[in-house]
Each structure stands twice: as C-alpha cells, then as structure tokens.
Image: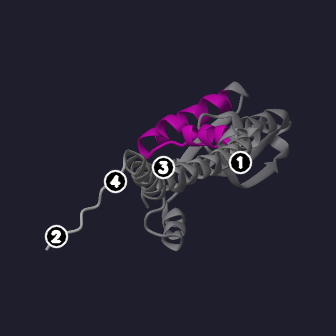
Amino acid sequence: MNPMRLSLTPWHRLLLGLVAAAALLVLLVRWVYLPVVGRLRDRAAAIHELRVKLADAQGVLPRLPAQDAAFQETRARFDAFQARLGTDEALASILDTLRREAERWHLEFRASQLPTEDAAERAMRLGPALALRPVPVALNLAGRYRSLGEFLGSLERLPAVVAIETLSVSHKPDLHPRLEATVRLAVYLLGRS
C-alpha cells in the first residue's frame, strides 16, 4: 500500500500559510482583542460615571451645613454657650461674680443656694444621665430701680449660664427711693444628676 502523498507546490504552501495566519488572527481578535476592548470600554464608562458623580458632589458640597454661614454661626453660639457652663466646683466662683456685679451697680447683695430638691426632681423626670442641670439660687437685693434693672440686664453677659426663674420687687416708703427685690435664679451646671 502506497499512502498517497500530498505534494504541495510553493504557491499552495504560501496560500495555506496565509489562511493559517488569518485563522490565527481571527482567533486572537475573538479571544484576546475583543475582551480587552470590552473591559477598557467598561472601565472608561465607570470612570465617566465617577466623574459625573464627583461633579454632582462638588455642586452639593458648598450647600452642606458645615460650610453654611448660618450653621457656622449657630455652632459658634452653641460653643460659646457650652463654654459658659460651670461645674459644681465653679458654683462658688459664679456666686462671687454675681456679688461683684451687684456691687458694681451699688446693690446690697445676699445670696443663698436653695435646696436642690427641685433640680433633683426635674433631673429624675428627664432621666439619670442629665448633663445640664439647674442649681437654684436666691438673691436678695436692695438698691435703686435703675441699678436693679442694670444688674438684671448684666446677667446675660456673665461667664455663666444663669436664668431668672422668679422676680419679686417691693417698695417700702422708709427705703425711698430704694427697692427690695428677691430673685430666684437657675445657675446651669454640667454634671450628672
């Protein structure tokens, strides 16, 4: 048996080589080039989407509360309020500041700390971890009408948070032109109830 031998002419060999090269090129395009191009397109689309989102975020950033002027003003006022809060240890100093302010306005001054049951009851209603608690203080003042008004107006400028809870003023003919006033204040302190 004589196997049939295929004899190729150089022209056929060249043609067969070209066909094999074309087939290899098609396979490379199908399995390498197209997947790489697809991934690059996906990444380009993702980058474009991220750029659009970044542009949107940059448009929103100036409107965020941290950069808003009204928010900054409110934050500064809150920080100033917090800085004015005293502690139990600072109560004597706060009372001394009240005394000095009363003397500045030529008022006779007597202060006494009231029992803290009212504050304790309020704290119990608000919860055991109350960070801000009022300490009631009674002031007895005697002086002229204008001095009393100036003293009460100066309370908001004190380096402590003080609120007037009650105020009673009486005029006695034998003290004319002086008035007597009893002021019940709440001095707000930081601490646990």
Secondary structure category for the residue under label 2: loop
Alpha carbon separation for disc pair 3 and 4: 102 Å
Please give the residue where the numbered disc 1 appears in the rendered image.
Answer: 56
Disc number placed over residue 8 in the picture, else none: 4
**For the residues carrying marks 1 and 3, which lies nearer the camera in this image?**
1
Q: What's the amino acid at mark 2?
A: Asn
Segment colored magenta: 75-103
Please give the residue where the numbered disc 3 appears in the rendered image.
Answer: 190
Secondary structure category for the residue under label 1: helix
Please give the residue where the numbered disc 2 appears in the rendered image.
Answer: 2
Q: What's the amino acid at mark 3?
A: Leu
Residue 98 within the segment the image draws in magenta:
yes
Alpha carbon separation for disc pair 2 and 3: 111 Å
Q: Quadrant of residue 79?
A: top right
Alpha carbon separation for disc pair 1 and 3: 43 Å
**For the residues carrying marks 3 and 4, which lies nearer the camera in this image?**
4
**Mark found first going from the N terminus, 2 or 3:** 2
Along the viewing direction, whichever of 123 and 10 lies nearer the viewer = 10
**Mark found first going from the N terminus, 3 or 4:** 4
